[in-house]
Image (tube, rainbow, N blue to C red):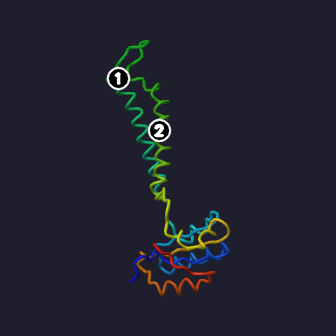
Amino acid sequence: MTRPGLYGLMAEFSDPTEVVAAARKVHEAGYRKIDAFSPYPLEALTEALGLHHSRLPLLVLLGGVTGLVAGYGLEYWASVIEYPMNIGGKPFHSWPAFIPPAFETTILFAALTAVLGMLALNGLPEPYHPVFNVPTFALATKDRFFICIEASDPKFDPDRTWSFLLSLGPRVVSEVEQ
């Protein structure tokens, strides 16, 4: 049982190879509610944490298809149903003329879905996070690497998790308060 107000435990590392090896061991130990912080992107760290692929590409595809249907549908409604005009003997449903605007609405909806979906899936904006309570976390933007195991993880036990993190050889292990 974890005490109230404890967000998790965080280990601090000096070297990127150390944090990648530690993240791999944390994932192999069965912890799943974990996060890592580094001053620059480490693809090996993402793989070591076992993070799954994003649903964002599917959302962007759905946004693009919605934009295509909406753009083409608007043009069809305006040109064929609501305001049909015989201009130069062309048919009301002149689909070649509908393609460029429908393409543009496809791009617009896909781009908006990409931005809004990325923000929603990342949980942004997040002006406050409990890891900011650890004094040394300010070094995460300079030269330190951190792994945080959340207290909400089913395998989390404060004493055993603390001992486990110490066995990984970090500089220091800290409690992260809510």
Q: How many marks?
A: 2
x and y, in percent, of residue 8 in the image: 48, 76
Q: Residue at x 45, y 42 (%)?
A: 64
User: Mark 1–mark 2 contact, CB under 8 Å?
Assistant: no
As helix, strand or loop, the secondary structure at mark 2 comes to helix
Decide: is 49 above or below 125.
Answer: below
Q: Which residue is mark 2?
A: 106
Q: Is residue 30 left or right of residue 45?
A: left
Q: Which residue is mark 1?
A: 80
Mark 1 or mark 2, earlier in chain: 1
Q: 131 or 169, which lies in front?
A: 131
The Cα–Cα distance between marks 1 and 2, rounded to whole angstroms, is 21 Å
In front: 162, or 30?
162
Q: Position of residue 61 (x, y in %)?
A: 46, 47
Kind of residue at badge 2: Thr
At numbered mark 1, what does the secondary structure look like: helix, strand or loop? helix
- Tag 1: amino acid: Val
Q: Quadrant of the N terminus?
A: bottom left
Above or below for 90 versus 151: above
Crowding at label 1, few (<14), some or many (≥20) Cα neighbours within 10 Å? some
Q: Nearer the viewer, residue 129 or 79?
A: 129
